[in-house]
Amino acid sequence: MKRKDGKSPALSWDGTEGDGAPLYAGVKQMILGRIQSGEWPPRHRVPSENELVAELGVSKMTANRALRELASEGELVRIQGVGSFVAERKGYSELFEVRNIADEITSRGHLHTACVIVLAREQAAPDVADGLDLPIGADVFHSLIVHSENGVPVQIEDRFVNPDMAPDYLAQDFTLETPNSYLTETAPLSGSEHVVEAAMPQPWECKLLVILPSEPCLTIRRRTWSFQNTVSLARLVYPASRYRLESRSGKIGADSKDV
């Protein structure tokens, strides 16, 4: 919403960012919050340095640094003599894609079912805290789910979620909707990281997947971001005899000339 003079409405900020963070970081977060909420859509003109100084009570140097860093991070476009504007969101395409397991199974005409083993609030262990960019011992949401295809277990999904990015995560029924689907709607994906490795299963994984200890597994460690925030850290375990990893780039057709 804009004022009658066409400028952005008065900004609300208490002048602090907490944890001793510098003032410019607080100004950046305030602006990012408006962008991520959709209040300031692409091409929306954001307050100028002088407007930030007047409405937030910060120095011109603080306002300049906040706008400059947001522009360098691709969140804003600054036009000399005109102003700063919210950047257009670029489409995101992954070379490596992990599909929603439910969609993958139903696309084959098979039945997907899920068994929720764990769905709880926990304190982040060092490796989880590092993966989610949170302090050690911070609250995190933990889900452990076994996905089956026609009654046969095909995936263990061991996931930790940043509560700030999905505050209602523990209230969901993940027998009806997968965490992948829910998080995609709640915190739209802007980036991801994958590590793929072969590994022998742990005893508890053998029990959940109903496999022998001698059967190797494919493990995918997946970390996702929405804008600047880490959303989740997941470990996906598949029995090698029941899963195959595929990746395809481009379109294959009769008119293709390059090989």
Image: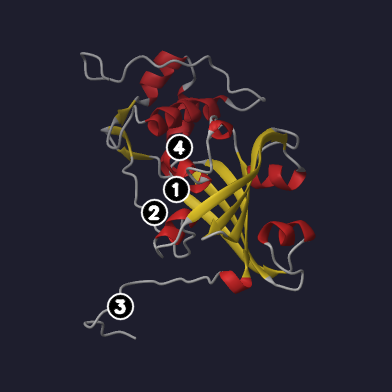
The furthest residue to the front: 151
Considering depth in this image, is 257 or 16 the residue closer to the camera? Answer: 257
Q: Point out the image quarter for the N terminus.
A: top left
Mark 4, secondary structure of its residue: helix
Which amino acid type corresponds to the residue marked 2 in the rendered image?
Tyr
Which amino acid type corresponds to the residue marked 1 in the rendered image?
Ser
Q: CA distance from mark 3 to mark 1?
A: 27 Å
Determine which quarter of the picture holds residue 252.
Answer: bottom left
Q: Which residue is mark 2?
A: 92
Q: Point out the image quarter for the C terminus.
A: bottom left
> Which mark, by number, is residue 252?
3
Q: Is residue 69 visible?
A: yes
Crowd rating for badge 2 (residues with CA inside 10 Å; few <14, some 14–19, many 20+): few
Q: State the residue at coordinates (49%, 55%).
A: 112
Considering depth in this image, is 11 or 51 the residue closer to the camera? Answer: 11
Crowd rating for badge 4 (residues with CA inside 10 Å; few <14, some 14–19, many 20+): some
Q: State the residue at coordinates (33%, 41%).
A: 87
